[in-house]
Amino acid sequence: MIRIDVSFYGEISDRLGRERAMVFAADDITVGEIRAELARQDEAAAILLKPQIRVAVDSRVVPDDAQVASGQSVVFFSIVSGG
Amino acid sequence: MAASANLELGHLDAGQELARFVAGLDGDGAVVSFTGLARAKASNGQAVSCLRLDWHPEMTPRSLIELALATAARFDVSDVRVVHRAGSIAPGEAIVFVAAASAHRRQAFLAADYLMDRLKTEAMFWKHESGPSGGCWIEPTEQDRADRARWSD
C-alpha cells in the first residue's frame, strides 16, 4: 500500500484544488501512473496528461518514469513564469 | 563571487535593496540593477487590479538561488542578488529586483540581463492577473522565450 500527497500549482489548481491524498494498492508506482490514475478518477484531471504539465517528487523535477515511494510528495505544476 | 536570493512576501523596496547591495561591495567599479513592476494593463489592454504570484515553499526559493548562482558562475561578477515578490501585488508595485556587481560595466549588464531572462521562463512562480472582467493565468510570452534562447545554455 502506498500513500502519496499530491498537490497542484498554477492553472491546474483552479480545476483540481491544491492538495489531495492518494492511496494505491501497489508496492511501487511511477509518476506517469499517478497522472493516469488521477485522470481516470476525475474528468477535470485529464489536463494532467498534457506534456506541459510537469511533475516534482519531493520538490525535485522528475520525468514520468520516476518511481514514487510511500510518504513522498508529488507536485504537478503548470508552466512557470517569474520576473 | 557571491550570490543571494530572497523570496519576499511583503513589500519590496527596490531603492533600499540597491543601497544595501552597494554597501556590501568591496571595490567594484560597476553595479547594474533592474526592477520589474506590476503593470496596470494586461497584454490585451484590459485593466489589471491585482497580480497574484503563486509559489511553492521549497521549489520557488530554490529556483531563485539556483538561477542567481548560475548567473554568478557564468559571468565575471563579484556579487549577484535577486529579490522576488510572491503573493498579491498591486499595479505599480515592484515584483522583482536583480543586481549584479563587477569590476567593469559589461559583465554586470550581461549578468542582470541573463538573470532576468531566466527568471521570466524558469523561476517557479505561477502568475494570475485579475481585473474587472475576470482573471487569467499568465505564461511566458514568445518574446520571453526568444530572450531566453539568446543565451546558449
Image (tube, rainbow, N blue to C red):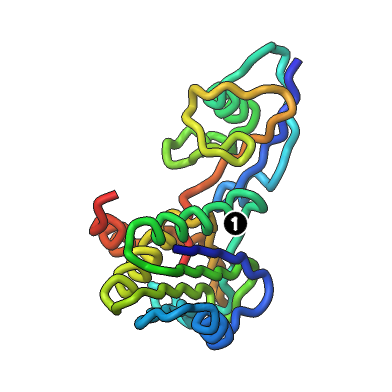
User: Would residue B96 be visible to someone looking at this image?
Assistant: yes
Tell me where residue B15 sits by quadrant.
bottom right
User: Relative to residue A74, is residue B110 drawn left or right?
Assistant: left
Relative depth, front residue between B107 and B149: B107
Residue B107: percent from the left, percent from the top? 30, 70
Residue at the spot 57% in from the left edge and 82% down from the top edge? B20
Inspect the image, locate mark 1, and give the three-letter code of the amino acid beneath it.
Answer: Pro
| Relative height, residue A81 to residue B39 (above, below) | above
Residue A18: percent from the left, percent from the top? 69, 47
User: Would residue B14 be visible to someone looking at this image?
Assistant: no
Specify few, some or many for label 1: CA neighbours under 10 Å numbering under 14, 14-19, or 20 or more. many
Q: Quadrant of the N terminus of chain B?
A: bottom left
Q: Secondary structure at mark 1?
A: helix
User: Relative to residue B152, is residue B70 drawn left or right?
Assistant: right
Query: What residue is disc 1 on?
Result: B61
Residue at the spot 53% in from the left edge and 62% down from the top edge? B127
Tell me where residue B52 sits by quadrant.
bottom right
